[in-house]
């Protein structure tokens, strides 16, 4: 009977994952068909496209290549093409760089998680793991991987639309590969809820391309080792990827963009408001025989954030792209943290600053 239950659980999860993946692919196909024509519109009055070497109308006009109402940048500073025309040399170089990064991450994860953990593939739900902070990490990882992949594809000659589509597909594919490797681990398995959040990140990235209002929400990651902030240190071998005590995942809102025009003058264009989520004392065991997260508690944070694209100065092509990419990292700023045990104000979250008897 136990074997039958395991088989039933395997089939049920496999079917559900297949249905979810099918829905994701259908959304991509529908979006591609609906919006394909809209992205072919070219503004004849826009002369800024002349910065392309051939001066043709094969590229998206500068006025249309925007994100949250500000200019978007590519790796080499060029505008993306309206239709895909692959650059073999560039694609080969960037493909090699990406492949090297994937191999590096595989070795890193192999040493940290999978070494000595090989068994038969199986599903194992871990919804309560790390109080769901890991789920926020899966979502951000899928989103950021999709962004990095799409940037490389645009530099390789893919159109903006195609690069966004395939960047999202590759982002989900990489996250699925990692989750599949977990499925062969003897102490855990392929977690369906992890995969759902793996898919959420690429899906949000894809949706932002077609729903401009969503561009006013930027996922961000903040990593500060917990020993720097006086918080409990994770009680196992850790990596920067899964050190949840040291990570906070944020959603930064571009307040200036969503304010009515008559109120914009009262708000700094580079100042955002962000909400964050994290946990303390993950995998810290007071009782070695107790559950891994027996001392853990959630933390919810609301604070100020910087829009680095508007705050940092313009520069060369690569600098502008780097500044754009750096904006996915959350830097210390004033914030209020709420947790079951107390409420804290920190001037430069997550750091604690002590001035005499005053701590903030």
Image: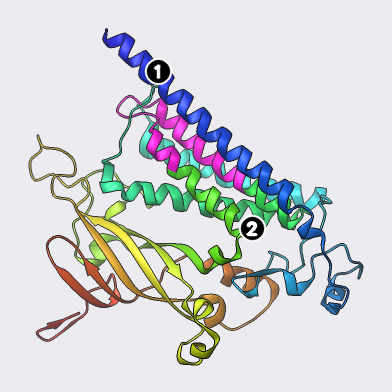
Residue at the far top in the pictured view = 1
Q: Which residue is mark 1?
A: 120
Residue 210's mark? Answer: 2
**First reached walking from the N terminus: tag 1 or tag 2:** 1
Q: Could you say where residue 228 lies in the image, as x and y percent from the top left?
A: 26, 66
Residue 275 found in image quarter? bottom left
In the image, the segment drawn in magenta is 168-196
- Is 176 colored magenta in this rendering? yes
Q: Could you say where residue 192 lies in the image, as x and y percent from the top left?
A: 40, 33
Q: Can residue 121 be seen here? A: no
Q: Secondary structure at mark 1?
A: loop
Residue at the far bottom in the pictured view = 265
Residue placed at 30% from the left, 47% from the top?
A: 132
Question: Predominant secondary structure in magenta?
Answer: helix
Q: Secondary structure at mark 2?
A: helix
- Is 95 colored magenta in this rendering? no
Separation of residues labelled 1 and 2 (CA atoms): 41 Å
Q: Is residue 47 left or right of residue 264?
A: right
Residue 28 found in image quarter? top right
Residue 257 versus residue 288 in the image, above or below? below
- Given residues 224 and 337, the one toward you in this image is 337
Tell us which disc is closer to us: 1 or 2. Answer: 2
Residue placed at 18% from the left, 62% from the top?
A: 339
Residue placed at 67% from the left, 44% from the top?
A: 30
Q: Quadrant of the N terminus?
A: top left
- Given residues 329 and 302, the one toward you in this image is 302
Q: Is residue 204 left or right of residue 60?
A: left
Q: Quadrant of the C terminus?
A: bottom left
Q: Could you say where residue 347 lies in the image, as x and y percent from the top left?
A: 27, 80
Residue placed at 68% from the left, 64% from the top?
A: 75
């Amino acid at each position: 009977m136990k074997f039958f239950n395991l088989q039933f659980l395997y089939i049920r999860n496999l079917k559900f994952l297949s249905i979810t993946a099918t829905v994701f692919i259908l959304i991509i196909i529908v979006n591609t068909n609906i919006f394909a024509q809209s992205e072919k519109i070219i503004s004849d009055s826009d002369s800024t496209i002349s910065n392309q070497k051939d001066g043709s109308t094969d590229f998206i006009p500068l006025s249309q290549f925007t994100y949250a109402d500000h200019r978007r940048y590519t790796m080499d500073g060029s505008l993306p093409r309206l239709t895909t025309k692959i650059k073999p040399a560039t694609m080969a170089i960037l493909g090699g760089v990406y492949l090297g990064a994937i191999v590096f991450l595989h070795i890193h994860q192999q040493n940290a998680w999978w070494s000595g953990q090989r068994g038969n593939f199986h599903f194992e739900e871990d919804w309560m793991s790390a109080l769901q902070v890991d789920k926020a990490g899966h979502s951000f990882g899928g989103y950021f991987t999709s962004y990095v992949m799409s940037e490389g594809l645009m530099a390789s000659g893919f159109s903006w639309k195609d690069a966004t589509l395939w960047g999202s597909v590759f982002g989900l594919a990489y996250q699925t590969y990692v989750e599949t490797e977990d499925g062969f681990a003897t102490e855990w398995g392929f977690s369906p809820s992890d995969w759902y959040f793996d898919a959420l990140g690429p899906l949000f990235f894809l949706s932002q391309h077609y729903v401009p209002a969503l561009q006013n929400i930027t996922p961000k990651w903040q990593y500060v080792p917990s020993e720097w902030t006086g918080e409990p240190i994770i009680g196992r071998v850790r990596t920067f990827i899964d050190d949840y005590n040291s990570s906070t995942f944020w959603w930064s809102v571009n307040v200036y963009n969503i304010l009515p025009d008559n109120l914009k003058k009262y708000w700094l264009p580079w100042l955002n408001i962000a909400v964050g989520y994290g946990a303390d004392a993950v995998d810290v065991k007071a009782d070695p025989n107790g559950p891994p997260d027996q001392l853990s508690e959630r933390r919810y944070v609301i604070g100020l954030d910087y829009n680095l694209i508007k705050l940092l100065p313009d520069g060369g092509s690569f600098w502008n792209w780097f500044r754009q990419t750096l904006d996915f990292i959350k830097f210390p700023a004033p914030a209020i943290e709420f947790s079951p045990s107390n409420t804290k104000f920190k001037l430069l979250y997550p750091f604690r600053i002590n001035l005499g008897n005053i701590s903030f």
